[in-house]
Image (spheres, rainbow, N blue to C red):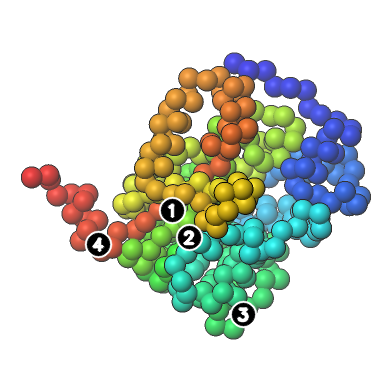
């Protein structure tokens, strides 16, 4: 059992916080602001975890509204030194998606960087958030971009079934209540058309925690990341929801692309997914909070998860795969 390091304070705390949230150096950040953030996230996370299915959307919406009201710098800060053009920041998504027009639904659009870029490229897009405070300034873009609020779980109650070619979530599922995660995947399955795909990114649990808990050197998530996942867990969840194909995506670092003079931003495949599953199994033998985390964070191999999860081309194909015996 590993022992947690002492919580940082003073200059070290501010440096860790600025680095984790990409806070501009010229922003007047104080230690009290960081400590208030820490206490607020812990309390809000407990409130959400203690909620039940009947009142969860109301509770979650209130908690995130409170979070961004009290921590306004998380929603409005700009760091020109680390700002990256949207075309470069989301280069992998651009290459993964087939050419427009395609209908795209994003869960947890935040400030709308990705969904606005895709709509400007001609995709028919809908951006969503749990609270209007987070993304309420995201403008409609005629027929190409609309905005909505949803719980991110029961998507079939908000959208017409089978109406989207792609669903995207970029670091979202770790914020969902663990009791809702299977319903989330079932909801995505419902609103995708046949042969549609779910593109999701999420932190890998082995490299975590990846929320504010990391700033304070904790070994487990205590903030708004309610649960971080592994490839093994996501394989079970996607298959149980009806999806029939999973591909892992490994993004090629920008510097390596330049060195090799290649434009392709990633490698992907089912074989890569099973390679990560095997690596995950091997990593289980390493001490959870020392060698394992060091390896994951330094190599980036199990630092985050990027999946393409495919819906079957037809219901007949899915039913045949699930229920017909092998001859």
- Pointer 4 or 3: first along the chain: 3
Residue topped by disc 3: 141
Q: Are marks 4 and 2 in contact (CB under 8 Å)?
A: no
| 16 sits left or right of 200 in the view | right
Q: Nearer the viewer, mark 4 or mark 2?
A: 2
Graded by Cα atoms within 10 Å as few (under 14), some (14 to 19) or many (20 or more), the crowding at tag 1 reads: many
Q: Position of residue 206 (x, y in %)?
A: 55, 32
What whole-number distance in Å separates the C-alpha atoms at marks 1 and 3? 27 Å
Residue 115, placed above or below residue 143: above
Whether label 1 touches label 2, CB < 8 Å = yes
Q: Quadrant of residue 298?
A: top right
Q: Position of residue 256 (x, y in %)?
A: 60, 46
Q: Residues within 10 Å of mark 2 (few under 14, many from 20)?
A: some
Q: Which residue is at a point 48% across and 44% down the rendered structure image?
A: 179
The residue at the point 65 percent across, 44 percent down is 224
Task: Specify few, some or many for label 3: CA neighbours under 10 Å numbering under 14, 14-19, or 20 or more.
Answer: some
- Residue 325 visible in the displayed image: yes
- Which of marks 3 and 1 precedes in the sequence? 3
Mark nearest the camera among 3 and 2 is 2
Determine whether, in the image, residue 198 is placed left or right of residue 297.
Answer: left
């Amino acid at each position: 059992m590993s022992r947690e390091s002492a919580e940082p304070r003073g200059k070290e705390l501010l440096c860790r916080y600025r680095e984790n949230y990409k806070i501009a150096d010229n922003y007047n950040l104080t230690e009290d602001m960081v400590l208030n953030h820490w206490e607020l996230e812990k309390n809000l996370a407990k409130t959400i975890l203690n909620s039940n299915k009947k009142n969860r959307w109301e509770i979650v919406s209130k908690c995130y509204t409170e979070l961004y009201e009290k921590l306004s710098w998380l929603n409005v800060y700009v760091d020109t030194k680390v700002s990256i053009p949207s075309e470069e920041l989301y280069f992998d998504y651009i290459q993964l998606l087939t050419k427009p027009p395609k209908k795209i639904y994003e869960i947890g659009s935040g400030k709308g960087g990705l969904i606005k870029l895709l709509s400007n490229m001609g995709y028919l897009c809908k951006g969503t958030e749990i609270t209007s405070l987070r993304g309420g300034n995201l403008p409609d873009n005629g027929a190409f971009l609309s905005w909505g609020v949803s719980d991110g779980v029961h998507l079939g109650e908000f959208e017409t079934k089978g109406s989207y070619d792609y669903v995207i979530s970029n670091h979202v599922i770790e914020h969902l209540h663990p009791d809702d995660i299977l319903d989330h995947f079932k909801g995505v399955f419902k609103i995708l058309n046949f042969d549609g795909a779910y593109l999701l990114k999420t932190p890998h649990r082995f490299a975590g925690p990846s929320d504010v808990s990391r700033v304070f050197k904790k070994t487990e998530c205590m903030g708004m990341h309610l649960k971080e996942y592994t490839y093994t867990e996501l394989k079970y969840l996607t298959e149980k929801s009806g999806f029939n194909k999973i591909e892992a995506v490994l993004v090629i670092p920008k510097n390596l692309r330049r060195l090799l003079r290649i434009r392709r931003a990633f490698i992907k495949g089912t074989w890569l997914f099973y390679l990560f599953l095997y690596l995950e199994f091997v990593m289980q033998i390493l001490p959870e909070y020392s060698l394992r985390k060091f390896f994951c964070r330094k190599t980036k191999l199990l630092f985050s998860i990027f999946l393409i999860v495919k819906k079957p081309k037809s219901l007949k194909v899915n039913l045949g795969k699930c229920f017909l015996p092998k001859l």
